[in-house]
């Protein structure tokens, strides 16, 4: 899987993990701010819907905010 394809699955995985943890987009955006990652609910929605690309730095911070290893965001489920 190329780097571009791998990044394409991150958004849906963020959504899947977030929802499995029972966290709303608003609450998750606020949680991201606690780990030093400022993100709006709208931006999060775009990431989850694959409308907006995710940077490598954002992937690390999203994983940290979700409390999962970064590799979890690359797994297809």
Image (spheres, helix red, strand yellow):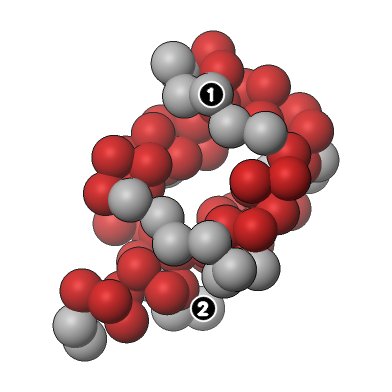
Helix, strand, or loop for circle 1?
loop
Q: Is residue 69 visible?
A: no
Cα distance between the residues tagged 2 and 1: 27 Å
The residue at 62%/23% (across/down) is: 31
| Left or right of residue 52, residue 26 in this image | right
Query: Which percent across, then down, holds residue 56?
Result: 26, 49
- Crowdedness near tag 2: few (<14), some (14–19) or many (≥20) residues, C-alpha within 10 Å: few
The residue at 41%/55% (across/down) is: 54
Q: Is residue 32 visible?
A: yes
Image-quadrant location for residue 12: bottom right
Q: Nearer the viewer, residue 40 or 74?
A: 40
Query: Along the polypeptide, which appears first: circle 2 or circle 1?
Result: 1
In the depicted structure, whether residue 51 falls above or below residue 22: below
Image-quadrant location for residue 36: top left
In the depicted structure, whether residue 75 falls above or below residue 71: below
Helix, strand, or loop for circle 2?
loop
Residue 16's label in the rendered image is none
Which residue bears the numbered disc 1?
38
- Crowdedness near tag 1: few (<14), some (14–19) or many (≥20) residues, C-alpha within 10 Å: few
Query: Which percent across, then down, holds residue 75?
Result: 38, 71
Q: Residue pushed farthest bottom?
A: 1
Q: Nearer the viewer, residue 41 or 12?
A: 41
Quarter occupied by the N terminus: bottom left
Mark 2 and 1 residues: CB-CB less than 8 Å, in contact? no
Which residue bears the numbered disc 2?
77
The residue at 56%/18% (across/down) is: 33
The residue at 19%/83% (across/down) is: 2
| Left or right of residue 34, residue 36 in this image | left
Q: Which-is-in-front pick, marks 2 and 1? A: 1
Query: Which percent across, then down, holds residue 14?
Result: 55, 55
Image-quadrant location for residue 48: bottom right
């Amino acid at each position: 899987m190329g780097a571009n394809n791998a990044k394409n699955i991150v958004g849906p995985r963020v959504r899947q993990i977030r929802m499995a943890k029972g966290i709303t987009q608003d609450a998750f955006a606020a949680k991201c701010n606690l780990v030093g990652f400022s993100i709006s609910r709208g931006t999060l929605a775009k990431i989850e819907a694959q409308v907006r690309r995710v940077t490598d730095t954002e992937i690390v911070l999203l994983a940290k905010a979700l409390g999962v290893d970064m590799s979890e965001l690359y797994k297809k489920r």
